[in-house]
Amino acid sequence: ADCVQPAHSDEMTPDQSSDINTNQASTLAWGTRMKGFIICFVLGVFCSILHHVPDWSVSAADDHVC
């Protein structure tokens, strides 16, 4: 009977302690993370399109040269 340990103990194992530290380090909610991802994705697409606009304008101007 002395070998039985309680189901809930105040002492944490190292694995439990690292899990708590990880959870405390990630303070952003899931919805906030998704909004951030979507904003960064849209900005990336926008910058990629913006990068190619001079190519389109040059080729469009070349088409109209006599």
Image (cartoon, grey):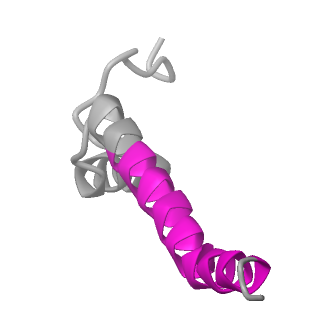
Q: Mark yes or no: residue 13 visible.
A: no
Q: Mark yes or no: residue 26 visible.
A: yes
Does residue 54 lie above or below 37 as drawn?
Answer: below
Which stretch did the figure color magenta?
36-63
**Residue 37 image position (x, y, % from top left):** 43, 49
**Residue 14 falls in which quadrant of the image?**
bottom left
| Residue under the image location 42 percent in, 60 percent down | 43
Does residue 56 lie above or below 42 as drawn?
Answer: below
User: Which residue is more in the foreground, 11 or 53?
Assistant: 53
Magenta-drawn stretch, dominant element (helix, strand or loop): helix
Name, please, the residue furthest toward the front: 66
Does residue 50 lie above or below 30 as drawn?
Answer: below
Q: Seen in the image, is 36 located left or right of residue 3?
A: left
User: Which residue is more in the foreground, 47 or 36?
Assistant: 47
User: Which residue is more in the foreground, 37 or 14?
Assistant: 37
| Residue under the image location 35 percent in, 43 percent down | 33
Q: Seen in the image, is 12 located left or right of residue 62?
A: left
Tally the numbered discs: 0
| Residue under the image location 50 percent in, 54 percent down | 41
Name, please, the residue furthest toward the top: 1
**Residue 10 image position (x, y, % from top left):** 22, 34
**Residue 57 falls in which quadrant of the image?**
bottom right
Magenta segment includes 20: no
Please state, as top left, top right, bottom left or bottom right, where the C terminus lies in the image.
Answer: bottom right
| Residue under the image location 30 percent in, 51 percent down | 26
**Residue 34 falls in which quadrant of the image?**
top left
Does residue 10 lie above or below 60 as drawn?
Answer: above
Q: Seen in the image, is 19 located left or right of residue 49?
A: left
